[in-house]
Each structure stands twice: as structure tokens, then as C-alpha cells.
Image (tube, coloured by chain):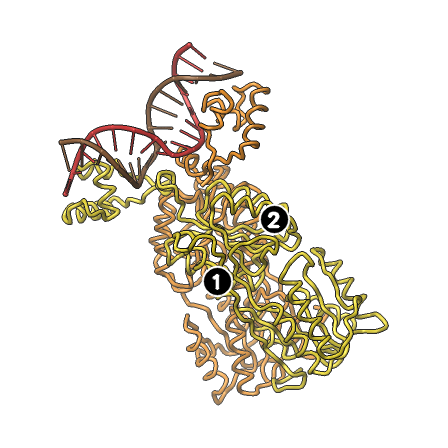
Chain colours: A orange, B yellow, C red, D brown
Amino acid sequence: MSNTNLKQLAAALGLSISSVSKALRDSYEISAETKKRVVEMATRMNYQPNPFASSLRRKKSATIGVVIPEIANNFFALAIDGIQMVAEQKGYHVLTYLTHENNTNEVSTVRHLLGGRVDGVLMSLCRDTQSVDHLSSLQESGIPLVFFDRVPEQMSCPTVTTDDYESGFRATEHLIQSGCKRIACLSLSHYLSISNKRMNGYMDALKKHGLPVENELIIQCTNDNEYNLSLIKTLLKGRKRPDGIFSTVEKLAISVYYVTQEMGLEIPKQLKIISFSNLRTASLLNPSLSTITQPAFEIGLEAAALLFRMIEKKTFGNRIDKLELKSALIERKSSERINKN
Amino acid sequence: MSNTNLKQLAAALGLSISSVSKALRDSYEISAETKKRVVEMATRMNYQPNPFASSLRRKKSATIGVVIPEIANNFFALAIDGIQMVAEQKGYHVLTYLTHENNTNEVSTVRHLLGGRVDGVLMSLCRDTQSVDHLSSLQESGIPLVFFDRVPEQMSCPTVTTDDYESGFRATEHLIQSGCKRIACLSLSHYLSISNKRMNGYMDALKKHGLPVENELIIQCTNDNEYNLSLIKTLLKGRKRPDGIFSTVEKLAISVYYVTQEMGLEIPKQLKIISFSNLRTASLLNPSLSTITQPAFEIGLEAAALLFRMIEKKTFGNRIDKLELKSALIERKSSERINKN
DNA sequence: CTGTTAGCGCTTTCAT
DNA sequence: ATGAAAGCGCTAACAG
């Protein structure tokens, strides 16, 4: 911990502790001259206020918590980037917690957060979260809480999301317009509204274009990657192989790549793929991969901005803010040259 | 902040505050029965200890700080993942700070950290850090400090790195063995030891194979992406275009892709590329990209483990730990399998 | 085994 | 304009 404290500073200056404290906080009660002396001495003695004493006394932590499923994921990494930017500008610190897509971790993290370590929480649910009890308890404890991307359905709360239904619709339509007749959908989790919305968009696009919605083409994936791979294998090796795949998340699209390579399937000739992805270079590295790219950084930015509005009590009464941003569809025609959309 | 505190808990139980405190910390001084009563009441009243009071009193924060250049970067995201895993297991919280490759941010972050908010710091330098004064001051303040990947050269301190010289050597040799005669090197920063080591490996590989080391083939890149692009363009559009490129970081390899596409250069026919990259799917998405992949997750793991050894004072005297892990070279021969487009 | 007490370092009335 | 004093909630001697 830091060594010099207010007491020592005060002693060195021949002032009282409270005067020094006030001087450092630029109180109007302190004369300009004294302030100058104090600040100078503070720098000279390399004074750093003890954050815990301050937090204890003032009942605020100058810290926000961010709870996400994983960090080695381009979407969340970019979102954190945006969050950090706002936090830093507000003089706040950021505590990050990873749930690893595991509800038990999510629950225990929330319990920790209840202790008052943070002034507000930004959260994106894990894929297997069903009950929202832990979320409600956080909310009821009075700690401002904003969800982004993966938001709860059964609970009224401020959220920042993207146009998932529409994106799913457009993605599927893109495959249809590229000639696909039999399109599979890889769902992240049927507990997550984003996954369901994307899937609903997929189904409606099929319907609009007179294609049947077939259950065996809708794959509910899990946390077990090996299992997902086997599901995808089964799908692609079946008698009636799909000619297009819409993946609701990047990771599953990558799994599809693995399987196609193993099988020697030609992409995009034999199979077209479109996926949600924030691997911004995906379509650069592989011209046959069309992607739906969410404004991840902006989502982080907006979510954090909303949270700070709540922390600073600039938000009104019970009004629940719901912000929806737009995703971008980055198309790649199979044989097209790269630098255009 | 939390609502119920020790005082209320004690009142509800008809015990003294200190007994309750001891009971909750499972002190040997308290009877089993009392402990049980206390724990039960604590859960019933939803008691959460105030972390700041505890930190203030015990002079430890149960928090570590992680200072990195950026988070939207596969290497750092994976490293954080490893760090978080260890921290969580130790019951520690993780504060993340991004310097955005800017030394000024690094310095001010370190100053914040001096305040005692964390019990230890994990750090990876930003590309333009030259002076290590701020780092020394942190170290001298007694806060355990471990550097990973981007470590200072002019300072003795515990570090976790990879075999950068060797990796640079092998990467370059790989290009040579693939038939390249004129290989350029994209350097991240001449202030960073990792970049220099990788470059030294590159130069020695050239020498070993009797190829000349040419200054105009060694590109010192900067923080300005546009400028880097122009450097790469100049390089590739010059009269004597290189037939191979060794990039010391992923981002610069991506920039090369942009330029080659713009120019219509064929990869890997006209230009072979090898790059440090933790985009684990890079070579899957693009079969012509060979990569050197660092064990990023493990680096995070080891760095955190080392830090906790220091925090727990299990490390001896002045012995400086230097751990070096191995990177993997993931080769792709130009015409090799994988269905190409 | 349980309770009393004295702070950790800071902020904030309330006096002077 | 400055200082004295109380206390945020918790821990850790020290008593009993």
C-alpha cells in the first residue's frame, strides 16, 4: 500500500488533517495559498490517497463491474474496450468477471458484487442462465445494472442490444439470394433472447421465400465443443445435406470450417456460410465468409454511458432504457473480388 | 452498497461484533454451535461484508491490476483469460487497465496503482515506453510486479515471455525454405525487446542462409495505422518487391493483406506471409497464412501464478524469476490440402 | 469461548 | 479559513 497518508502530510505542513483533506479536494473553505502549499507538498511526498478509506467513508467505490461469458471473444473484447473508454473518462476503475458460460459462476459473481465493491454493473448473460433471481437481487439492492447484448427476457431492466431479429432475417435472405435452398441454423442457446431472435429472423426469412422450416436443420448447440462438432458432422454428413448455414455465433462457424475441411467439402461451392462475427478480418482472410458484424465497441460505449447516467442519478424514475443498435451485413459473393461490399 | 453490516448481524444474534466477525472468518476461538448460528443468520439477513472496510483494516485489497496495451487483441484477451482463472481460484478480483499503446496512459495508470488499490500488478508494456522510471517506482513501492510478453530490458524484474528470438529465426527460415529470397520484416517497435528479439532472429536466419540483411526491408511501424499501410504499400510497390514477409505482430500481417488485395497481388504465389498471431483460426480461415502462435493463455496463467507467489511472499529474496515459454510454428505450405478458393 | 477496545485513512459536520 | 471530532465497517490485540 501507499506509505504517506494525510496525517503525515498534515504534520509536514503544520496543518490539520481535515484542512489538508479539504485542500486536496479543492474545497472552497481553504485559501488559495494553502491549497497551493498542500498540493505541492503532496506531490513532493508522493502522496496517494488510500482508495479504501475514501470508499468506506463516502460509500462509493469509483469502480464498475463487468460480467461477461468470456473475454477471448472478439465481440466481448471490443465491448470491454468501449466500456473501459467511458470508465476511464469518468475516473472509474473496471473490475472484470468471466462466467465461462456457466450460470453457477454468474450467480456467485453477482453475490460478490452485492457486497458493494462496485457502483454499477454491466452484464451479458451466460448461455445457460434461465432463472433471473440473482439478477433481480442485484437490481433490488440498488446497484445500477445495465445488460448488453445477452439480456434477460423475463425482467424489466435497461439494455443495449442490436437488431438481432432483423439481422437473422437479412443473413438468411442473403443465403437464399445466393441460391441456397436448404439452410441450417446453428443456435447458441435457446435460453438466450439474442439467439432466439436471430433464429426467428431466420425462420421468417425462410417463410417469406416459401422455404420450409425444418426442425432437423435447427441445431441447438451447447457448451461442449466436441458435442457441437459431432452435431455439425451429423448435419453435414446426413443424406440431405444443407447447402447453406447460418451461424448465430462466430465460434460455431469456425467449427463448421473444421468439419468441412475434414470432409473435403468445398466452400462456398458446396456450402455457403454466413455468421455473426466480430472477427473484423474474417472476410478479409476468407473471401467466402459473409458476416454480420455487430457494433461491439459502440455497444460497450453506450452501455457504459447508460450505466453512468444511472450512477449519477441522471436517469429518471422507473423509465427503462432500451437501446437498439444496428448490425452490418458484410456480404461476400462466392467469386467476387474482395474490396467491395 | 450492501445494507446489513456486522453490527446489525451481531444485534440480531445477541452477540458482540467481534464474535460475529470471528465466527464468519471461522476462527478457532468460536464454538462450533455459535459459528453455525452466525452463518445461518448471515445468510438469512443476506449479509455481505464490506470489502473496503476489510481492505482498509487488513491492508490488502484482494485485487490485482492488469495493465495491457489493448484488449481487442487475441494475445492479450487470451492472456487475461489465464490471469482471471488464477485470480478467481485465489479469491482475487482483477482490475484491468488499457494503455492503448500510449506511454502517458501507462504512466498515469501506474500512478493510480501506487495508491494501494491492488496487491500486485501484471503488466505488458506499450510500444512507445522507453523510460522505466514509473515502473521502478511501482516496484520500489513494494507492490509485487510481474511483466509478461512485453517486458522492460533496462530493469531487473520477474518476467514471463516466449522464445522470441528463436521464433523469429524459425519463422524466417520457414519462408526461406519455402523459396523466398527477399524477405521483409515488419517490426512493431524498436523500443520493445520482443520486437527486437524477433527481428534479431530474422536477421540471423537470413545470415545463416547467406541472404543479405537489407535495411529497406526492415520496416519500423508505428501507432498510426494509416502510416503503416503507406509504408507497406511503398514496400510492396517498390521496384524490388519482397517475395516474403515476416510480421512480428498479427495486426501488421492483416495490413499486408489489405494492401495485397488492393494491388491484386496473389498470396501465396507472389508473396508469402508468416506472422506472429494468436488468432487461432487464422490458418484455418486462410490456408496460405503460416503463423507463430504464442501460448497466450499459459503466459497469463504463469504470470499470475508467479505474481501470487510474490504476493504470498513465497518467493525468495532478490531472486528474479524469468520464465520463458515456447511458441508454436503452424506451417502451411502454399499448395497444401485444404480446399482453396 | 466471548467481549471490549483501538484503530485502518479518510470525509464531513460542526465549532472556532 | 482552519481545526476537532465522530465515524464509515471491519479486524485484531487483549481482557476476561
Q: Nearer the viewer, residue A138 or B325?
A: B325
**Which chain does the residue under circle 1 lie in?**
A
Q: Horizontally, is B99 left or right of A235 in the view?
A: right
**Residue A240: image x %, image y %?**
50, 87
Amino acid on which the number 1 mark rests in the picture? Ile
In the picture, the disc for residue B132 is 2
In this picture, is A24 found above or below B13? above
In this picture, is B205 found above or below A78? below
Secondary element under disc 1, as helix, strand or loop, is: helix
**Which chain does the residue under circle 2 lie in?**
B
Residue drawn at (44%, 34%) of the image: A54
Instruction: Sort mark 1 into few (<14), some (14-19) or many (20+) by Cα contacts within 10 Å.
Output: many
Question: Which residue was labeled with disc 1?
Answer: A194
The mark closer to the camera, 1 or 2, is 2
* Quadrant the N terminus of chain B occupies: top left
Q: Give the residue furthest to the bottom.
A: A239
